[in-house]
Amino acid sequence: MGLLLCCGGYAQEKAVNKNGFTINGTVKDYNGKVYLTDEVKGQYIRVDSTEAVNGVYSFSGGNVDWPRMMHIELEGVSGMGSFILENGEINIRSNDTAFFYHSTRAHNTLNNEVFNKYRIDEEYYTVTTHRAEVMIEMLRYPEKMEDAEYQSQQFQRRSREGTQISRQLRMTIVETYPDEVISLIMLRTLAPKLSADSLEMYLGTIDDKFDEHPYTKELQTVLNAKYADIVGATAPNFTATDSNGKTVELKELRGDYVLLDFWATWCAPCRREIPILKQLNSTYGKKGLKIVGISLDEDEAKWRSTIEAQKMNWIHICDSFAWNGEIAVNYNVQAVPKTVLVDPEGKIVAIDVRGEKLVELIKSLLD
């Protein structure tokens, strides 16, 4: 991506890198390790480090081909401070290590200023106004302050309103800055909840100069998955290694019905489906049904021990990238459990059918 980093140590004076980027950071009352952290498929990777002395640190590097979201981490401090890595001088200030994300703000470059304004607006509309609303309720309806059900309803209402406001603020940025990378960053957060048509529409407004940006390619993959996530679509092919070390390719299973079961060991509803899957495998495993369990576990040992303990005798795949893994992304997996039934020709015939309804469906197809 053209990112070349070098530590700036603890220079006490700001240095400007006109041909790349310079980060001038301050952290109140902190001395210690500072990490520059990237995100790859949902996993955070530290790409550089330096030391903060008397709360001052810096990083610098060469030309940033594709501006993107990055993070600052402090050793021994929970959370990360987010900013947008782009060419120019970026000033990052953190006022409270106890609330590191919320107290860390980046300034002095266009995309960071837009991102900062978004965070100010979001905090104002979803936190400050809600605090004021709670105070109004306390003064107006003091008798309801001890009503747990009423308070729960009000909290849920404010949460829904806050989510909607935050969503609208991000949409406004996409619409206002289609020629800046901030639009892609915001669209990435919106994409999971957008319909295929809406995502395609928003993608179409993004400036052509971002056609090769990794975020654009990622969003195009999400869009393709949304169009594939319908009954009648061709099931996206995949190749993976199963729990026995064998290669599994979906198209090689054509000729049988294939049930893709997206699950995880930590998912209680998923585990409740295991007896149903065992029943289906026992009854129809030799009559034209192949079950492929696709786990979103990051703990491979736990995944393997669960398969063995539960005697789950069908094909199993585990993607360490979990939600951001290629198969999960291509099948638009936003929650587990999720099932996708593929017919012998490779077409999707059912999505999210579980329990007895799944048993009835398989019975109607194979008995």
Image (cartoon, rainbow, N blue to C red):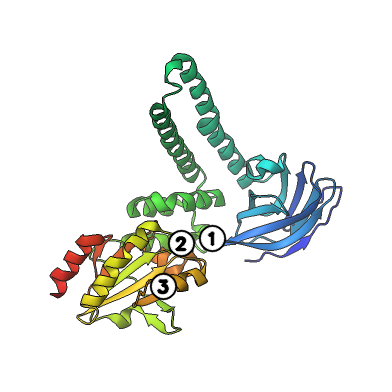
- Whichever of callouts 1 and 2 sits on the residue coming sooner in the sequence is 1
The residue at 86%/47% (across/down) is: 13
Q: Which residue is mark 1?
A: 42
Q: Is residue 2 above or below residue 313?
A: above
Q: Going by the image, does 111 lie left or right of 59?
A: left
User: How many residues crowd around disc 3 within 10 Å: few (fewer than 14), some, or many (20 or more)?
Assistant: few
Judged by depth in the image, the label closer to the viewer, 2 or 3, is 3
Query: Which picture quadrant has residue 248?
Result: bottom left
Judged by depth in the image, the label closer to the viewer, 3 or 1, is 3
- Nearest to the observer: residue 180 or residue 70: 70
Q: CA distance from mark 2 to mark 3?
A: 25 Å
C-beta proximity under 8 Å, tags 1 and 2: yes
Q: Which residue is mark 3?
A: 309
- Nearest to the observer: residue 261 or residue 249: 261
User: How many residues crowd around disc 2 within 10 Å: few (fewer than 14), some, or many (20 or more)?
Assistant: many
**Residue 76: horizontal and vertical position, in percent?**
72, 53
Q: Which residue is mark 2?
A: 323
